[in-house]
Image: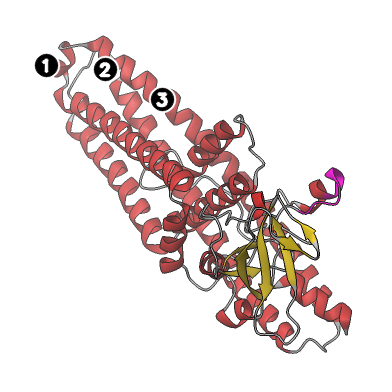
Amino acid sequence: MSSNSDNPSPTAAAAAVDTTPLLGDQIPRTRPRFLRRPPSLHGAARFIRRASSRSRAMREPSMRVREAAAEQIEERQSDWAYSKPIVILDLVWNLAFVIVSISVLIMSRYEAPSMPLRLWIVGYGLQCLLHMVCVCVEYKKRYSERNSEGSEREQFRYSRNYSNSSSGSDEVESGDYVSDHRQSDDETSVAKHLESANTMFSFIWWIIGFYWVSAGGQSLISESPQLYWLCITFLAFDVFFVVICVAVACVIGIAVCCCLPCIIAILYAVADQEGATKEDIERLPRYTFRKIGDFEKQNGEIQESFGGIMTECDTDSPIERVLPLEDAECCICLCPYDDGTELRELPCHHHFHSACIDKWLHINATCPLCKFNILKNGIQSGSEEV
């Protein structure tokens, strides 16, 4: 009988679990920016996940679900960071830094600091300009990809409704999309490298600026007050944004580990239609769970280590499946199945609380354990049956 932990062999289990990002290659993973080069939540969340991977039982189902949720949050945060309002705010913010730098350099042309503060301010402004260019290139790329993804999603809806159409045309269209996607990646590879180099250089440049300001001491305040306070302001802003981003990353990490249902509910509330529709979810079979006593007989035999029975709903000949005790719990909310609880099973035979998995599938139409896509794989299965 199938259960939440049915694995034919270690090799098959390794092949069944897709370790690629939760949203696939449709949305490339980049370092999102907010205002001026804060550390991304993508890196912080990955650091938290890697740290937890060193603990025991990292590959337990509940931990795999939380890994998938962390990836989902990273993708959402990346999309949000490159949304039109945030990009405009980012560009305006960095442009303001450049304008202020030029203005102060002009007004302080007669100041003679003992440390090369002008050089540091010029370097800081150039970093802002380079960051603006990289953001514009990345936003343009993502904008074109959103349009491609929207048309692709409509094609999937169309092909699911008209599954009798030939599969060859679908393969051609999919091949064209992959080709366009790779071309877009090639066009922005230079911008990605520049942005990464700019981020590393900005960290080194911050240390250099902090050293020059500290080494100059109180003499800089009297020699060049405008340059001095501008450098202090820029250094303070960078520290402020780093602290904010690290704090947010820690809060997200704790929330994913301790309160995943709340995170899913928030994502469900703010999600656009990228996952499965209500009709797609309702096609999945529902089950009712019934607990088995420690020594209750099942099929004429005494079952001592089973947690309960899943009975299929809304059918004349319901299927019953016996669940081991360790599988009689939801990997999303970590709550054990109670008598009468409604469960939903995915085509990959993983099962969860119906309320938990329905919200998840609305956000992303993949199994949170093995990342089986209920939409695309459903289309392929339908084509094979025809």
Q: Is residue 136 above or below residue 56?
A: below
Query: Could one spot residue 115 in this view of the protein?
Result: yes
Viewer-proximal residue among 296 and 28: 296
Q: Where residue 329 is drawn, which disc sits there? A: none
Identify the image's colour scheme: rainbow, by chain, secondary structure or one colour: secondary structure
Q: Are marks 2 and 1 in contact (CB under 8 Å)?
A: no
Amino acid type at image mark 2? Val
Mark 3: give few (<14), some (14-19) or many (20+) Cα within 10 Å. some
Return the residue at label 1: 222
Q: Is residue 332 above or below residue 277?
A: above
The residue at the point 44 percent across, 45 percent down is 258
> Magenta residues, as a range?
6-12
Q: Earlier in the sequence, mark 1 or mark 3?
A: 3
Q: Are marks 1 and 3 in contact (CB under 8 Å)?
A: no
Viewer-proximal residue among 214 and 128: 214
Q: How much space separates mark 1 and mark 3, taking CA atoms?
A: 24 Å
Q: How much space separates mark 2 and mark 1, taking CA atoms?
A: 13 Å
Return the residue at label 2: 213
Return the residue at label 3: 205
Quarter occupied by the C terminus:
bottom right
Viewer-proximal residue among 54 and 235: 54
The residue at the point 59 percent across, 30 percent down is 55
